Image: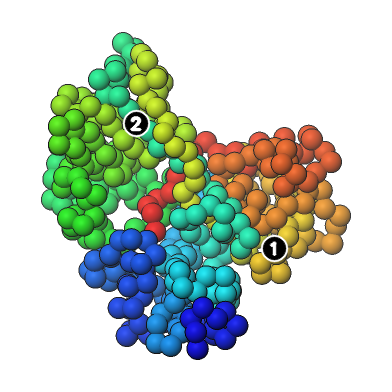
Amino acid sequence: MALSDPVHTDVTPRPAADDDWSRMLRLDATSFGHVVDPAAMAAWRSMIPAGGAVVVEDDGDIVGQALYLDMELTVPGGGRLPVAGISWVAVAPTHRRRGLLRSMLTELHDRIAAAGYPLTALTASEGGIYGRFGFGPATIEQSWSVDRRRAQFRPDAPDPGGVRIVTPAERVDDLVERYDRWRAVTPGGLIRPRALWDDLMADRDGERGGGSPSFAFLHPDGYVLYRAHGEGARYVRVVEKVAVTAEADVALWRTLCGMDLMERIEIETHPADPLPYLLTDARAVRTTAAGDALWLRLNDIPAALQARAYAADLAVVLRVTDGFRGGGGTFALRVTDGHAHCAATDAVADVELDVDVLGSLYLGAHRASSFAVGNRLRCNDSGLVSRLDAAFATDVTAELGYPF
């Protein structure tokens, strides 16, 4: 059989076996250009349920792979839902355009549905792939480059203090405690098992991207993990910034900006990060990129919509289309005093949308009115669209807990 022949390629996924993982590591390295350390892979494998990884094999080679992780997601209002986190998706460049991705995601979602997960999540290497599978980008991420020399704080900006320099591995329990408080109140927050903390604290050379070992600043209500980069002109690359309170956020930023030998600070953050509002010259903060981080798909629409809190009362009938799974349906959503009841109905729909749009609205990062402008949310009542905006809005900006 010629590998270039798409007709005879068997694209039927099967469960991954223990002796598949060395070949899976090779396909992952080929696809993403990075070799995963076996110890790191063991940490992630501890989160895969039985039968949660599938592969496609061709003549002894693994040519497709995908898996899901057993995770827990914080939703607006502080509720928590089990979520299947899709990861390690790869199709060999020798086997493109043969339906491998669709077959693997179909198989995984059959398993996810059988396990009862109301949500599926992922982080996407490419933005044009997953919408057709019902996923919508649910958080907004901005890349900032902060000119540290110009980052002067306003005279009236608060100066809470309380930050200490620590060695990350020596204070991991403190980091865990602050992270757990942060993720409990932040939409998009993910439970981080101890195996992943141990992997993060391992701080392997291959994970440093040419930077220094990890450094840390610790506050009673937050922390920053960062690396120093560069030879002559040194700069800081923030690995993770967690702030449970606004005071912690300000204190950590003041400390980062106080490193006089560093020329700039690079960070991925969210649109509500307060730094520009603290400075005499907000142009010291330059947005170098903007995109998405967490993508969501609602598998059980009533369960997911009832789990989160809402900012305004609402009564609406939603017609949700799911082209991937053939699911969706028509649902009556009624919100009173922040709490929702959602059930299937035969009533005429007020609003029509695809399930990927609902995924984008779910954590409050995107507005219904924006999708209405693009005709991706269809409604003849502009007042109702405004009420959707108000109901799905959140006080706490959604953020991805950590990449997976």
Residue at mark 1: 322
Q: Can residue 108 be seen in this view?
A: no
Q: Residue 101 carries which label?
A: none
Look at discs 1 and 2 and give the one toward the viewer.
2
Q: Can residue 320 be seen in this view?
A: yes
Q: In this view, does 53 lie to the left or right of 311?
A: left
Quarter of the figure with the C terminus: bottom left
Q: Quadrant of residue 59?
A: bottom left
Q: Residue reaching furthest top?
A: 155
| Amino acid type, mark 2 | Ser
Please name the residue shown 57% across and 74% down the image. 98
Please name the residue shown 61% across and 57% down the image. 131
User: What secondary structure is found at the residue carrying circle 1?
Assistant: loop
Q: Which mark is residue 145?
A: 2
| Amino acid type, mark 1 | Asp
Task: Please state the horizontal and vertical placement of residue 350, each as a whole percent of the image.
Answer: 82, 48
Mark 1 nearby-residue class (10 Å; few <14, some 14–19, many ≥20): some
Against 149, residue 198 (above or below) is below
Q: Earlier in the sequence, mark 1 or mark 2?
A: 2
Please name the residue shown 71% across and 41% down the image. 374
Task: Please state the horizontal and vertical placement of residue 311, each as a whole percent of the image.
Answer: 61, 39
Q: Which of 170 and 277 is in front in this view?
A: 277
Q: Nearer the viewer, residue 108 or 175?
A: 108
Number of marks in picture: 2
Task: Please state the horizontal and vertical placement of residue 71, each as a whole percent of the image.
Answer: 43, 63
Against 13, residue 89 (above or below) is above
User: What secondary structure is found at the residue carrying circle 2?
Assistant: strand
Whether pointer 1 and pointer 2 mark residues with C-beta atoms closer than 8 Å, the reply is no
Q: Quadrant of residue 319?
A: bottom right
Please name the residue shown 57% across and 70% down the image. 97
Task: Please state the horizontal and vertical placement of residue 250, each as a whole percent of the image.
Answer: 32, 27
Q: Residue reaching furthest right?
A: 348
